[in-house]
Image (tube, helix red, strand yellow):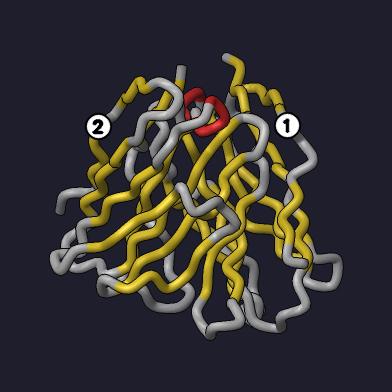
Amino acid sequence: KAGVTQTPRYLIKTRGQQVTLSCSPISGHRSVSWYQQTPGQGLQFLFEYFSETQRNKGNFPGRFSGRQFSNSRSEMNVSTLELGDSALYLCASSLGQYNEKLFFGSGTQLSVL
Amino acid sequence: AQKITQTQPGMFVQEKEAVTLDCTYDTSDPSYGLFWYKQPSSGEMIFLIYQGSYDQQNATEGRYSLNFQKARKSANLVISASQLGDSAMYFCAMRQFTTSGTYKYIFGTGTRLKVLA
């Protein structure tokens, strides 16, 4: 069974640009959540999608957005990039039920210059 | 507010010895779940162990065990017989319910473990 796949693995952008990251969950998983990981802040929750609906959202500005498609694949978009957006972005999938573990991808390392 | 605290930014352990990674949490919800994840240098987070707030016994998964002390709100991870491959970042996490009736995870800042040969 294939794991969670995130593309691209690495990304370099400049300030002001926008970026789209992709996540393909494990087959059958309907929940996809996104996290931003930085050395100073650790893992910060961005948002979670379940069956194409945003179910939860973290405390990030509106420049961060996401969506989920009918096949459960998800994308997140960051517009007007800032230097502070440089981070590892992790995607996790699960069936969407209570008290179950998350399955993570290897992440997309975004560098904003 | 719900919070996870990992006070050890880094730790060393000799190969084949046991090590305890500390985690304390803060929540007012009676129902919650506690998780430990391992993050090697590749970046992928790997699930290690889970403890539910109503579980009577401490969770164990192979060489991993969770020392759950509910009254003290601590959920320490114990790794027995450390191996070189255990060198990684370790995160404690808690699942919390939201006001909308769903749930989300919060993570601690992590502990970097280095196993010495």
Residue at left offset 32%, top offset 36%: A19
Taking the spot 67% from the left edge, 32% from the top edge, the residue there is: A40
Residue picked out by circle 1: B9
Q: Position of residue B90 (x, y in %)?
A: 58, 40
For label 1, the SS is loop
Q: What is the number of the mark on residue B93? A: none
Q: Which residue is mark 2?
A: A8
Please state if A99 lies on the left or on the right of A38 as rendered.
Answer: left
Per the image, label 2 sits on a secondary structure element best described as: loop
Q: Quadrant of the N terminus of chain B?
A: bottom right
Left-right relation of A70 to B41:
left
- Identify whether A45 is placed above or below B32: above
C-alpha separation, residue under disc 2 versus residue under disc 1: 29 Å
Q: Residue furthest right?
A: B72
Q: Is residue A72 left or right of residue B91?
A: left
- Give, as a three-letter code, the residue at label 1: Pro
Q: Position of residue B74 (x, y in %)?
A: 77, 60
